[in-house]
Amino acid sequence: MFNLILFGPPGSGKGTQSEKLISKYGLKHLSTGDLLRSEIAGQTPLGLAAKSFMDKGQLVPDEVVIEMISSALDNNPQAYGFLFDGFPRTTAQAEALDKLLSQKGTSIAVVLALQVGQNELVKRLLNRGLTSGRSDDTKEDVILARLIEYEKKTAAVADHYKKYDKVVYVKGEGSIDEIFDDLSSAIDKRSRA
Ligand code: B4P
């Protein structure tokens, strides 16, 4: 199996690049943001609980997202590999993911960390908010809260994987195709290693 994490702050291009990478590398896309939004659309109890956090720009509690990922892994036994998008977002989630993968006899091959400046992130998210229908993209205070959550709780996930020499930084500003080429080269190098 080849498993990778696409990592970066909100608006760094994780969702955008994931779509292209899964089709090139035949990976199963697991986006906790998408899974949570589909629970909200289905008005499930999990979705209703998650919405109150997401609307404020806060992270959803670890146990909720870990359980969602655990089920998604169990439901895809034939996958060649997984692309994790927006997960893990805390050190506890990273430790839980490592454990779940090791129980399946596999691990994370590489963490691709997209680097984008804060002004560009805010601009992209507000711009997406014009058309996405996502309430967490329309209010600047909610966007700033998401960026603060990222610095406070998520940035440490890169430190967790640096201990195992798994993090590759990729510039996340420029054209979508240029960034995709850089991500692809990083994957090709790691999959040959
Ligand atoms: P997510 O759905 O993961 O969303 P995101 O981080 O906001 O966006 P992403 O990074 O994927 O967006 P993209 O850059 O592709 O999370 C939403 C919320 O769900 C979180 O705030 C949290 O509450 C909750 N949540 C999710 N996972 C969780 C977890 N594991 N634990 C706890 N809570 C969790 O796109 C942004 C925009 O930039 C797009 O409009 C795109 O077109 C544009 N763009 C992309 N690349 C560009 C480029 N190169 N140049 C210009 N624009 C670009």
Image (cartoon, rainbow, N blue to C red):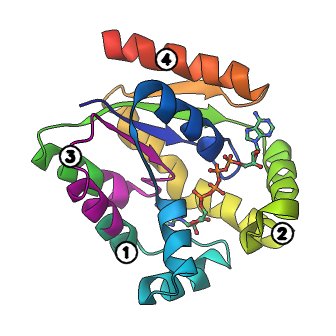
Amino acid type at circle 4 is: Ala
The Cα–Cα distance between marks 2 and 4, rounded to whole angstroms, is 33 Å
Q: Secondary structure at mark 1?
A: helix
**Residue assigned mark 3:** 101
Please count the marks in the image: 4
**Residue assigned mark 2:** 138
Q: Secondary structure at mark 4?
A: helix
Q: From the viewer's side, name the closer residue of 151 and 143.
A: 143
Residue at screen point 86% across, 46% down:
119
**Residue assigned mark 1:** 64
Residue at screen point 53% across, 61% down:
34
**Residue assigned mark 4:** 186
Residue at screen point 18% across, 37% down:
106
Lower sequence index among marks 3 and 4: 3
Lower sequence index among marks 1 and 2: 1
Horizontally, residue 122 falls left or right of residue 18, namely right
Q: Find residue 125 and report its horizontal and vertical position in percent.
A: 79, 55
Lower sequence index among marks 3 and 1: 1
